[in-house]
Amino acid sequence: MQKKILIINGHPNRESFNFGVANAYQEGAIASGAEVRTIHIIDLKFNPNLQFGYRKRTELEPDLLLAWEDIKWADHLVWVHPVWWGGLPALMKGFIDRLFLPGFAFQYRENSLLWDKLLKGKSARIITTLDQPSWYYTLVYGKPSVNQLKRSTLLFCGISPVKVTYIGIIKTSDPIKRDKWLQKVKQLGHKQA
């Protein structure tokens, strides 16, 4: 059966290396026979502020409704993003805040601390770029962006397994090193992993 893959690129700069990463994964996945869709969050028109929290529902803009249909459609989600100040870019965080809502991605149980995971049956890969070695990001900082996206969002909503690929150090890399990283990502796409 053909795997349905959704690539979600959270970098707000179209000239960034992250766009190359997203494209490399897409190339590999298409070559393997997967059906692929891509969301570049910067291309969406929406307010990233969850103004009322969960107290009052803010209507989803048309671009978010389409993005949610893509998320529901996909078997495998590939999240591509840089690490900025230890976390996700603000626009990507807003995308998650606005879409991964009660009744969509999870549902709290009445009079309980437990919740239902509404995105079970999906898997994910996080591909994150760093300006520091991944071991340093993990040991010194505790990999906060990965914990936030993997544990506090994806696993919370039932998406499992979630695998992580670190790419870096970006700021000191040369074109040869970047090409090697892109080839590695293309192989991940080809394996549909």
Image (spheres, rainbow, N blue to C red):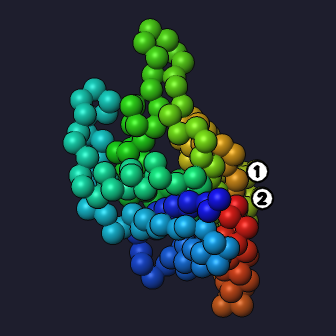
Q: Residue at x 23, y 39 (%)?
A: 58
The amino acid marked with disc number 2 is Trp
Is residue 188 toward the left or the right of residue 102 in the image? Answer: right
What secondary structure is marked by label 2? helix
Q: Position of residue 152 (x, y in %)?
A: 56, 38
Identify residue for label 1. Answer: 139
Q: Amino acid at mark 1?
A: Leu
Q: Quadrant of residue 133?
A: bottom right
Quadrant (top left/top right/bottom left/bottom right) for the N terminus:
bottom right
Mark 2, residue position: 135
Up the image or down, 22 lies above or below 127; here it is below
Q: Is residue 59 left or right of residue 181?
A: left
Disc 1 + disc 2, Cβ < 8 Å: yes
- Farthest residue toward the bottom? 175
Q: Position of residue 23 (x, y in %)?
A: 55, 77
Q: Is residue 112 above or below residue 103?
A: above
Characterize the local packing of mark 1: few (<14), some (14-19) or many (20 or more) Cα atoms within 10 angstroms: few
Residue at image position (50%, 76%) is 19
Occupied quadrant, residue 44: bottom left
Query: Please, what secondary structure does the residue beneath circle 1 have?
Result: helix
Tell me if residue 166 can be seen: no
Instruction: Give the percent coordinates (x, y) of residue 5.
Output: 56, 61
Asked if one can make out residue 4 in the rendered structure from this viewpoint, the answer is: yes
